Amino acid sequence: MIPLRNGALALLVLTGTTLHAQLALQPYAKIEPPAINESSGLVKSRQFENVYWTHNDSGDSARIFAITRDGKPIQTEWAKQNSQPYEGIPIADAVNIDWEDISTDSHGNLIIAACGNNDNGRRDLALYIVPEPDPRTAWKTRTRQRIDFHYPDQKEFPHPDRRDFDCESLFSANGTHYLVSKNRSTPETKLYRLDSRAPFKSNPLTLVSSFNLRGQATAADASPDGTKLAVLTYTSLWVFEKPTESDDYFSGKASYKTFFAKQCEAVCWDDAETLIITNEQRDLFEVKLSELVPDR
């Protein structure tokens, strides 16, 4: 190794500091309710104006939170008039075991992914299908259906050497639910599709394809029309255009933006040209598609 002279070392440090400042996202708002202490998923409501749903990671009760685009809580009139602290909306018949992401469908449901699997040993991975409540009038909601699932390519729980069956990313498009893996042993991120929803049994996912995100996927969301997929990592945002002939988003045109924003865990489409990102520190960030650069 060739030793750096003091001037060269100072330049290297200064360059790194400048680069970090250039890539740092600046929050436009902060999630206000203290009860939201680890925002792990985010989705924009299809039914209610200026409503965004989020939830905490494992360790919290089974509940969801409604916030505005600016991170303010959405409560019932009674709760506001009586100055009640916002505690979210509880979900009956559900248990929060590593809830990692949330999406919506065209039937008025929220879909919550209990898919966190850090040690790759879980056999109770599930999606909770929940009727979306009106956050301005509802006190609670309940599970409409629980869909258990598993990875067809996982044979050991956990595998002694591989850690490729964790997941923090769910999205729904064109009536179908998809999950994106968070691999630790290999650089490839896998895209899976849920093709069956049989009750009282574990449904095998279908492996669609894989892609090297150059980072671990922490969240995903499909655009309102299903033609684009956003995938978040700790240091980048990727957008894939769906091919016309298949649902293999990873084979479509890809673009990305690299950034620094602490521990980013959630992303959702705000409109056709804008995405919102949150981190565990409850910051809210906005990214425009025009800020991304082509990957291929």
Image (cartoon, helix red, strand yellow):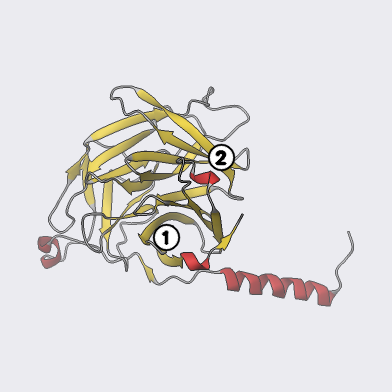
Q: Are marks 1 and 2 in contact (CB under 8 Å)?
A: no
Instruction: Say left or right for 107 vs 185.
Output: left
The percent position of residue 182, horizontal first and vertical second, equals 52, 42
Name the quadrant containing residue 294. bottom right
Looking at this view, name the residue that lies furthest to the bottom. Answer: 7
Where is the N terminus found, in terms of image quarters?
Answer: bottom right
- Residue under the image location 55 percent in, 59 percent down: 256
Q: What residue does disc 1 label?
A: 278
Name the quadrant containing residue 19. bottom right
Exactly how many numbered labels are in the figure? Answer: 2
Looking at this view, name the residue that lies furthest to the right. Answer: 2
Q: Amino acid at mark 2?
A: Ser
Name the quadrant containing residue 96. top left
Q: Is residue 235 visible?
A: no
- Residue under the image location 42 percent in, 54 percent down: 266
The percent position of residue 86, horizontal first and vertical second, equals 23, 59
Instruction: Say left or right for 139 vs 263.
Output: left
Where is the C terminus found, in terms of image quarters?
Answer: bottom right
Q: Is residue 69 visible?
A: yes
Q: Earlier in the sequence, mark 1 or mark 2?
A: 2
Q: What residue does disc 2 label?
A: 210
Identify the secondary structure beneath mark 1.
Answer: strand
Label annotation for residue 17:
none
The percent position of residue 219, horizontal first and vertical second, equals 45, 50
Could you say which is closer to the camera, residue 98 or residue 54? Answer: 54
Q: Which-is-in-front pick, marks 1 and 2?
A: 2
Q: Amino acid at mark 1?
A: Thr
Considering only vertical position in the picture, is 282 above or below 124? below
Mark-to-mark CA distance, 1 and 2: 25 Å
The percent position of residue 8, horizontal first and vertical second, equals 82, 74
